[in-house]
Image (cartoon, rainbow, N blue to C red):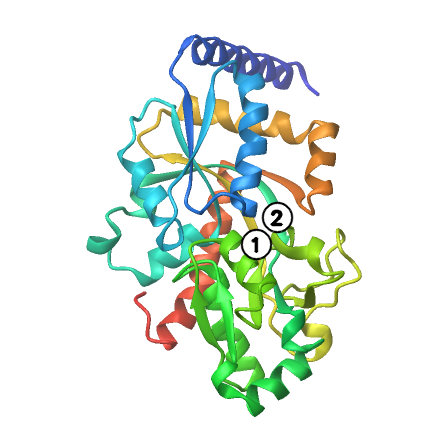
Amino acid sequence: MTWIQRIKQLVVASYLLACATSFAQDTAPIRIFVGFVPGGTTDIVARMLAEELRQELGRAVLVENKPGVSGRLAAEALKNAPADGSAYMFAPDSWAVFPTLLVPEAALRYNYFEDMAPVARVISYPLGLYASKSAGVKNVQEVIAQAKARPESAMYASAGTGGISELLGLLLTRSFGVKLTTVPFKGAADVKAALLGGQVPLGIMAPADILRYTDDKIVAIGFMSSKRWSVAPQIPTLAEQGFNVTQGDAFMGLWASSRTPKAQRQLMEYAVRKILGKPEFHERLIQKTLEPSFAGAAELDQQVRQLIMFWGPILKEAGGKH
């Protein structure tokens, strides 16, 4: 490291320390909006992160659940919150992608590119297709055979209308060659309850929401990812079973209002980086079948834009707004 680089590093560190001191002196609690019901992966990770942020920032950090329409209610709350660094949104990538592509701006009441600012990516994971044990299927071929034999029951649960878990079903329908009808719920916790209760035969979910039930009540049909997941390597991908549906690689992160001062957003990004670098927090995530995956604001922004470019033509073909 050159002396110039060292000086730059010290300047940045001094700047962040000054911001942190100012941030800690503010006594207003930080609110983290979650657009889904309590008990799902998004809610669980948000609360784990909030617990660490309280210590890191020296301020109260509250999680507020605002379930409905795939995170749009939470996003609207974020847009309308005070732009002083006291409001953030923790969400899966899908909230930024699919409402932007599918919902007219007048109905959406916010513009992702103008009103929202990425802060940091926190975790990544593969979405998977799961079956209730009562459905009597163990792999993709059996799912397809049953859907053909009983089309009236060929349905899957998703965690909200217009979200990734619903729209991945479009890709499954195309790849499987059979119609699968979505049954939307308000969040992953409701999807889990429906699967465990046998009210729906199939569900598309994040592994942390359902994987611990796969020994007795749930069958993991396969991950919709390009390769097997290191956290649960025993579960095959759909691609291994002959169906090239690999768009289920997902992630969750933190966003702020674009009106939030950049210094406050950078401080939060720095705090998240520190938290994810703690071995004990890393281990807590792994124990919950979650994979820590930090990225800063610029990389998170790039990922979202790439997803919007990928899904745009697919949804246009399917009749969606683009």
Is 34 in front, or is 265? 34
- Looking at the image, residue 101 sits to the left or right of residue 220; the answer is left
Q: Quadrant of residue 197?
A: bottom right
Q: Nearer the viewer, residue 194 or 130?
A: 194
Q: CA distance from mark 2 to mark 1?
A: 6 Å
Q: Residue at x 69, y 80 (%)?
A: 242
**Residue 27 horizontal/vertical position (percent):** 40, 11
Which x, y percent locates residue 86? 38, 24
Which secondary structure lies at badge 1?
strand
Q: Residues within 10 Å of mark 1 (few under 14, many from 20)?
A: some
Locate the C terminus and report the quarter of the image it occupies.
Answer: bottom left
Disc ID at residue 250: 1
Query: As displayed, is residue 103 above or below residue 3?
Result: below
Q: Earlier in the sequence, mark 2 or mark 1?
A: 2
Where in the figure is residue 94, as x and y percent of width and height? 46, 54
Quarter of the figure with the N terminus: top right
Amino acid, disc 2 = Ser
Contact, mark 2 vs mark 1 (Cβ under 8 Å): yes
* Mark seen at residue 124: 2
